[in-house]
Amino acid sequence: FIVNSGCSKHMTGNLKLLINFVEKFLRTDKFGNDQIVPILGYGDLVQGAVTIKRVYYVEGLNHNLFSVGQFCDADLEVAFRKSTCFIRDLKGNDLLTGSRGTDLYSITLQDSNFPNPICLMAKATSSQAWLWHRLKHGYGIVVCSSRLKFSQSNLNFDTINLLSKNDIM
C-alpha cells in the first residue's frame, strides 16, 4: 500500500483483498492526472492482525492507497523519516511501519508485527478533506490528533509526540 497524503480515502483496485464488501456506487473521485473514476463500494481489508475498515473499491486502480488524512482522522499519528514511515496510536505505539522506495512510502501489511488486532477507520468532513488535499505535500513530519498539526522541523518524533499530547504545538 502506498501512503498517500493526497488521497481522500483508503482505496484498492483489488476486490479480492476486501471482505464484508458492500457493492454500492458512492461517488466519483478525481485523480491527480484528471482521471475521473467511480467508487463502486467498500469493504474491510484484513491481513494478519491488521483490520482496516471501509476501504473503497475503485475498479482498475493499479495501486493500493492508504490515506494519510484518514489515518489522522482516526486519531493516529503519521510520521515520515528519510527512509521510513510510521503509523502510531496516540500513546506512541507503532501500528504499521513502511519504507521509502524511490520517492514513495509504502506499507506491506504482511510484515506488520503488531500483536493485537487493530481497526483503522475514520470519517472526515469535506472541509477537513479539502484541507488535507491543499496541504498534502512538503511536510517532513505530520502529527495528527483531533486537530491537524504540522511540523517541518527535525525534532525527534518522541519530542513532537510529547508536545502534541500536551497541546503545545
Image: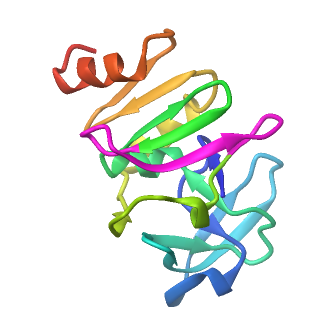
Q: Nearer the viewer, residue 95 or 134?
A: 95
- On whether residue 101 falls in the magenta region, the answer is yes
Residue 5 higher or lower than 149, as above or below? below
Q: Looking at the rendering, in which quadrant would you find the N terminus?
A: bottom right
In the image: residue 100, left or right of residue 51: right
Residue 139 in percent (x, y) is at: 57, 22
In the image as oriented, which residue stretches furthest toward the left?
166
Give the residue at x 59% y 33%.
136
**Closest to the observer: 109 or 36?**
109
Image quarter in which the C terminus is found: top left
User: How far across and how far down the image is residue 16, in percent?
Assistant: 66, 86
**Coloring scheme of the render?**
rainbow
Identify which residue is drawn at 83% across, 36% down.
Answer: 102
Q: Give the left or right position of residue 114, taking residue 62 as reference.
A: left
Vertically, is 167 above or below 72? above
Residue 77, position as x, y percentages in the image: 38, 38
- Range shown magenta: 88-105
Which sits in the foreground, 74 or 126? 74
Q: Is residue 116 depicted above or below 17 in this figure?
A: above
47 versus 143 height, above or below: below
Magenta-span inclusion, residue 144:
no
State the count of labels.
Answer: 0
Q: Looking at this view, is 14 or 95 the one in front?
A: 95
- For the point 35% across and 58% down, the residue is 123
Q: Is residue 34 left or right of residue 118?
A: right
- As drawn, is 130 to the left or to the right of 38? left
List x then y, in percent, for residue 26.
53, 76
Residue drawn 63% across the image and 21% down it? 138
